[in-house]
Amino acid sequence: ARRPFNKIQIDGSTSLAFTEDVGKRYEAYGWQVLTVHDGDSSLESLRIAIERAQADLFRPTLIKVATTIGFGSSKQGTAGVHGAPIGHADLAAMKTSFGFDEKEFFVVPDDVQQAFRAAGAAGSAKHAAWKAVLAGYALKYPDLAAEFERRRSGVPPAGWRAALGELTFDKPLATRQSSQLVLNKLCELLPELVGGSADLTPSNLTKFKGAADFQAASPEGRYIRFGVREHAMAALCNGMQAYGFLRPFCATFLNFFGYAAGAVRVSALSHFGVIYIATHDSIGLGEDGPTHQPVEALLNLRATPNLLTLRPADAKEVVGAYMVAIDNSKRPTVIALSRQTCSNLAASSADGVARGAYVLAAPGSGAPQIVLVGTGSEVQTLEAAVELLGDVRVQLVSMPCWELFDAQTDEYKRSVLPPGVPVLAMEALSAEGWCKYAHSVIGLRTFGCSAPAKEVQKRFGFTPENAAQKARELLKYYEGKVAPCLYDRPDN
């Protein structure tokens, strides 16, 4: 007799919320859909279905298995057995009905042990045979075998960092444009890099030079058209990273990473070094308005454990951001990139990115009276503000990554943000969180607005003139008193 499928959810029957025919949906996708009607009792039916799935070399297969939730329990077929223990009395009755001793716990029957041990022995034999084939391959094709082992280990090829560091940039670029140039070189150096965009390739600028699309007719392609599927995109990258041999990257607008948040969190939780490219990283994207302008997005990412969030200020810092990403194979990285042009800063440093923050310009003589610190496109704004503060000893700091700066020694932190010196931060995103480092923040406390980028920046105070004015106000506030050292605390 055919059993109904396990149509139970925590709330009760799945019919309360879900009535579609999943099998028909997958058939419409072009999948092979197989059904096992006696999943409670027939291992043979399961074996036959799996073999049929393995025999189809051209389609993925979905196997629908009809089972009864909590089979054998007095609560079988109900939501009562979904997430709660069935209880000692019911467990004892189940054991008895299935021929087990109700007083025994954690006992593996002999026939089950034998089956698993036989499977282990068979697997060991197949593994030994595979290793022998690999050894023969290495003798015949030593270079290819060495590349295979390198990719299996996840270690980047020798010389990649030096080659990336040789990139030069002769004009100001949006950091998303710098990113494309870096990706071009990086994908040439690391053939294991694969990835793509969530239907935003012309905006994310992620299609690298010479990239072929990964499609059914071109499975050797390294560029993936993920479509408008941000969560699935990040989840697929998790799968590739978990399997190994490949280093995946993917991209969308920074604000749309909210749709991928669950899978990005899994990257961090699972120590998967997926590279996330997040363009259009502030209200500076302009006319698309507050639906596309990220405000809280970067703060959400920064608050995620084991996730590195970088917002480079110019092309050299973009190089440094990708170096950090490649170095961190066990830690995912988000690289937030601008739509608008960023000047190439005279003292910016790819190597400095790895320390999270570094001094771009120190006062010509004497200790600084104030520190101006920013990230991304606002660093050039603060650099212009320094010129308006000619009578003030200013230390200019770029802070592309909070997490990396937090990991530095106290001595280094004090060299970048000297104790007792007021700090003014500027970032065209949420002002929240900057209180860890700055005594005053030019940031966002509302959503943005739709207007040309320069008008939006002016409206919200992201100008050199406003930065200079706020710096003078901060100096006046601390006149005659010492600004507290914000990172000097027992939980740091």
Image (tube, rainbow, N blue to C red):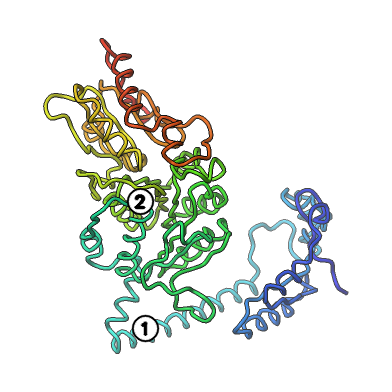
- Left or right: where 128 falls relative to 346: right
Percent position of residue 349, x then y: 23, 47
- Left or right: where 55 falls relative to 245: right
Secondary element under disc 2, as helix, strand or loop, is helix
Residue that lies at the very extreme toward the top in this rendered image: 480
- Classify the position of the C terminus by image quarter: top left
Q: For the point 66% across and 57% down, which residue is it?
A: 105
Residue 37 quadrant: bottom right
Residue 386 quadrant: top left
Residue 107 quadrant: bottom right
Of 466 and 158, the residue lying toward us: 466
- Left or right: where 371 falls relative to 304: left
Q: Nearer the viewer, mark 2 or mark 1?
A: 2
- Classify the position of the N terminus by image quarter: bottom right
Q: Is residue 376 above or below residue 3?
A: above
Residue that lies at the very extreme toward the right in this rendered image: 1
Earlier-in-chain disc, 2 versus 1: 1
Q: Which mark is residue 175?
A: 2
Secondary element under disc 1, as helix, strand or loop, is helix
Kindly identify which residue carries mark 1: 134
Percent position of residue 27, x then y: 72, 74
Percent position of residue 488, x then y: 31, 26
Identified by mark 2, the residue type is: Thr
Identified by mark 1, the residue type is: Leu
Q: For the point 29% across and 52% down, which residue is it?
A: 315
Q: Is residue 249 above or below residue 366?
A: below
Percent position of residue 452, x then y: 46, 42
Q: For the point 43% across and 47% down, which residue is it?
A: 307
